[in-house]
Image (spheres, rainbow, N blue to C red):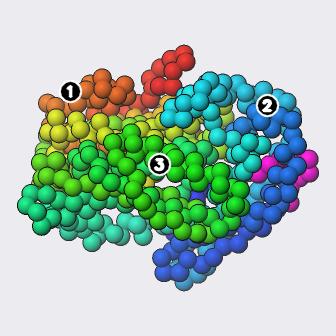
Amino acid sequence: MTVANTLNFVVAYLLKSPQTLDRIDIRSVEGGATDVLFVSLVSSKVDAACDQRLQNPYHAIIRRHFIACHLECLNVQFSKTAKPKISLLITMEQSNVTQEALAAVQAVQLELTGENATSLALRRPFDPISKDEGVSYLRIYFFLNFCVTHILSMFCNFANQSDTEGVGMDASVTPLRHGGLSLVQTTDFFYPLVDDPYMQGKITAANVLSDLYAMGVTECDNMLMLVGVSTKMSEKERDVVMPLILRGFKDCALEAGTNVTGGQTVMNPWCTIGGVASSVCQTSELIMPDNAVVGDVLVLTKPLGTQVAVNAHQWLDLQDRWNRIKLVVSEEDVRKAYLRSIDSMARLNRTAARLMHKYNAHAATDVTGFGLLGHAQNLAAHQKNEVSFVIHNLPVIAKMAAVAKACGNMFQLLQGLSAETSGGMLICLPREQAAAYCKDIEKTEGYQAWIIGIVEKGNRTARIIDKPRVIEVPAKEKEGELW
């Protein structure tokens, strides 16, 4: 199985030096029975380049936009009997520092207007190589772990379709000894995907909480945080990066009306960030994800394309990759799509879950790593009734559908297979309630939701029609507004 598409977020941040950097050493480790590939980039040459970069007079304002390396992955194969074969090549570009500095200033003007740490628009952006930070956050990316998607999907085969347990649900539901109460719990973790550790912490917490929200649970009683700190990070890097991640996670928990009361921190070859969310609920607080009926419609509460936006942003400085998409998207479009993806991923699905009760939702799931179609298929497979889901509309972050098309089958966005992080809720709603639900969520949060498909009689499958309607989000650009 080729998994070139799985290596979506591999990016090493190198610092441009007067000399051309040599080929970076690569080593791969056999993953064995679990088909896990560990990719490590040896960073000694990067460290040497860092020392030179710190002397650059434009250092304080040159952003992460153009500090990316060119990383090429060729013929990555997974096999239980053979070692993975991987070829990675990093090259650097030379350009005028002054022009880059000016472009960087323009790119971040909106973000440099305040010190509000909880606002994406006002918060000072994290500079991974600034003198103040003294750390390259993206060294975290040097130690990554990738799981083959089909291994993860095997867990769904063990699902118990009773009302109380089953891996097929987004969260576990355990009836307590005390009558009428259940313990609802979920856990999740992943690897860094944005270059701001504070926002990464917020995205992680929002992603963990989404599994509770998918069950209709709107009140979280407790959160734990799970952190794997890379052993390859220096003490200085850990002292700067990890507190920012923790702060972002905690701030998101507070926004959700809960607290982080503990967790576990370990040293690890690669960085992982995750958590646990728990809630003690009455039965009436739950919406079991198995009651869709013929005639329901499918509603999606966040646009697709976060993965595409993150990758396109990384490609701004990877000339051969940028050449593939520059005819269909501008640099400004990419930067705005990246900020939109961060804003979307850090946004809680709590309002969406609360309105599920008001408008009598029959089933729901959150859209994350398996993409829209993958999660729709899993939800359909666990329905009590003989139904199938048919998806007609695909809301996508503006310009990202064009980027995905320009990249061939790399993302499979329009096929519904592009991974999302902290994505929206996919909800089965009564047809007569769906439009009111969408209007209510926009009125409450200021964000759109969309009717994207229907529930029809079938054999518990899901599909996207051959030529789905792509909805650009937003439909029109508004001066000075993100959405």
Q: Amino acid at mark 2?
A: Ala
The residue pinned by badge 2 equals 101
Residue in the picture at 46% in, 61% down = 226
The residue pinned by badge 1 equals 436
The residue pinned by badge 3 equals 249
Camera-side mark, 2 or 3:
3
Circle 1 crowding by C-alpha within 10 Å: few under 14, some 14–19, many from 20: few
Look at the image and give the residue range highlighted in magenta. 14-22
In the rendering, at what x and y percent does residue 55 appear? 88, 43
- Main SS, magenta residues: loop
Q: Above or below — where is 250 with respect to 150?
A: above
Judge from the rendering whether residue 21 lies leftward or rightward of residue 2; answer left or right: right
Q: Amino acid at mark 3?
A: Phe
Q: Is residue 422 visible?
A: no
**Lower sequence index among marks 2 and 3:** 2
- Look at the numbered disc 3 and give the secondary structure of its residue: helix
Q: Amino acid at mark 1?
A: Ala
Rounded to the nearest angstrom, the CA distance separating label 2 from label 3 is 31 Å
In the rendered image, residue 16 lying in the magenta stretch gets the answer yes
Residue in the picture at 33% in, 54% down = 222
Residue in the picture at 51% in, 61% down = 227
